[in-house]
Amino acid sequence: MIRYYVIFEGRVQNVGFRYTLYREAIKLNITGWAKNRLDGTVEAQFQGKKSDILFLINNLQKKSQFILINDYFMKEIDIIPQESSFSIK
């Protein structure tokens, strides 16, 4: 199990991006959260299998024609053992 902190840049607000993250994370049994930031980016944390998290991130743009990820920043952080769901903040 691993946890990542990620910031997504691009066309990621007002296009259903967080809902898409939520829907796909649930399918892959990934926990964490996602929220909009004032600068137009989306901040998220993902916890689960590394391969599932990387699959989720790499396939987000394919889930909606409106989503456009120009770049993202990702770093590994400490896991939260008691976390059991994914939420939109």
Image (spheres, rainbow, N blue to C red):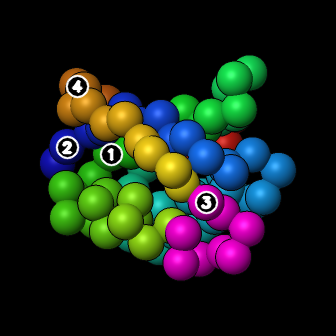
Magenta stretch, residue numbers: 61-68
Q: Determine which of the numbered discs, if any, sits on residue 78 in the image.
A: 4
Report the side of 10 relative to 4 (left or right). right
Neighbour tally class for label 1: few under 14, some 14-19, many 20 plus, Cα within 10 Å: many
Pointers 4 and 1 in contact (C-beta within 8 Å): no
Give the foreground label among 2 and 3.
Answer: 3
Q: Position of residue 57 (x, y in %)?
A: 40, 59
> Which badge, 2 or 1, comes first in the chain's sequence?
2
Q: Which mark is residue 47?
A: 1
Residue depicted at x 53% and y 78%: 62
Judged by depth in the image, the label closer to the viewer, 1 or 3, is 3
Q: CA distance from mark 4 to mark 1?
A: 9 Å
Can you give x and y, in whole percent of width and height, for residue 39 in the image?
A: 69, 23
Residue at the extreme right of the image, as rendered: 14
Q: Residue, x 71% and y 32% (percent of image)?
A: 40
Q: Secondary structure at mark 2?
A: strand
Which residue matches tag 2?
2
**Is 64 part of what is drawn in magenta?**
yes
Mark earlier in primary sequence (2, 4):
2
Magenta residue check for 14: no
In the image, what residue occupies the spot 43% across and 72% down?
59
Which amino acid does the dot numbered 3 rest on? Leu
Mark 3 — residue? 68
Q: Nearer the viewer, mark 3 or mark 4?
A: 3
Tell me, yes or no, whether the two marked residues, 2 and 1, touch with CB atoms within 8 Å: yes
Q: In the image, what residue occupies the spot 20% across and 64% down?
A: 51
Inter-mark Cα distance, 2 to 1: 6 Å
